[in-house]
Image (cartoon, helix red, strand yellow):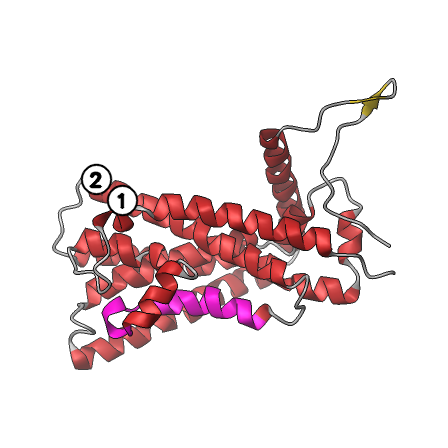
Amino acid sequence: MLRTGRPRTGPTAGGTPLPAESLPARVRWAVTSWRLAAAMWMRAAMSYRANFVLTSVGSLLVTFLDFLVLILMLRHTGQLGGWTLPEIGLLYGTSGFALGAADLLVGSVDGLGERIRSGTLDVLLIRPAPALSMVCAERFTLRRLGRPLQAALVLGWAMRALPLVWTWPRLLLLAALLVSGTVIFAAVFVAGAAVQFWWGESREFQNAFTYGGATLLSHPPGIYGKELVAGVTFGVPLAFVNWLPLLRLLGRPDPLHLPPVFELASPLVAVLCALGAALAWRAGLRAYRGSGS
């Protein structure tokens, strides 16, 4: 029976156990493992260059259809929940970029359930590299750049179309928003995958918070009920991806009337989400007993 997730200790020297690796060293090794695995999958993908180019262009065009629907809708209504098209473009661009970047970096982790059912996760656990890095980098391909690239184009257009002066504080707030949003979505990916250690069929449930969450965040919060807005603020904190920071950036009222500090709390929430996801993954890995294969 396979036991996993035990704290690592260093090698022994003369029978005396060496201290366990430090946390920074383990993080560096995890990042290095992810980079090496991603490079291996990229070399494999580039063996078929035409397929790579066609799927990349196709991904870019398909994701643009989402924003095209918003354009067509606002041509008839003018505004949505009191928000103009450039303001909604800012919502769409920031949420799409955060989700796309997280999907590019760790999105493959949502296939963990299939590995558990087939027993192939055991193969990763005996390799001298963190299993999370291996799962996140699996089948890595730059064709996933289509979503964040398309979102970045919409974001750039919205920034030019908005009647805002982009001062340094506003640009820093927007940059912090994009980084924090990416970390929050990545944490949701990993935490959702950890659930699959106990509930192997939870992939679609996880997608409701990732891809469904990005769709939710691309629309103004005022068009939703306060209960839903409160749920994505204090439950799964997706509101910190873009809603709350952009309310401050655009000078819009907060439907929940929260203290102004909430509009600047995205980096702190991102750190807490990352810690929570790491603990969830560790708990899931400890509970895993192997396939018996």
Q: Which residue is mark 1?
A: 173
Check residue 169 in the rendering and tell me which mark sits there, or answer none. Answer: 2
Residue in the picture at 20% in, 52% down: 248
121 vs 214: above or below: above
Mark 2 and mark 1: Cα distance apart in space? 6 Å
Tell me the kind of residue under disc 1.
Answer: Leu
Q: Is residue 252 magenta?
A: no
Marks 2 and 1: CB-CB under 8 Å? yes
SS at mark 2 in the image: helix
Residue 220 visible (yes or no): no
Mark 1 is surrounded, within 10 Å at the Cα level, by few (under 14), some (14 to 19) or many (20 or more) other residues, namely some
Query: Is 224 or 35 nearer to us in this picture?
Result: 224
Residue 201 visible (yes or no): yes
Q: Which residues are magenta?
A: 204-225
Residue extending farthest bottom = 76
Tell me the kind of residue under disc 2.
Answer: Pro
Query: Is 56 or 195 nearer to us in this picture?
Result: 195
SS at mark 1 in the image: helix
Left or right of 176? Residue 161 is: left
Q: Position of residue 75 (x, y in %)?
A: 19, 78
Left or right of 109? Residue 61 is: left
Left or right of 3? Residue 28 is: left
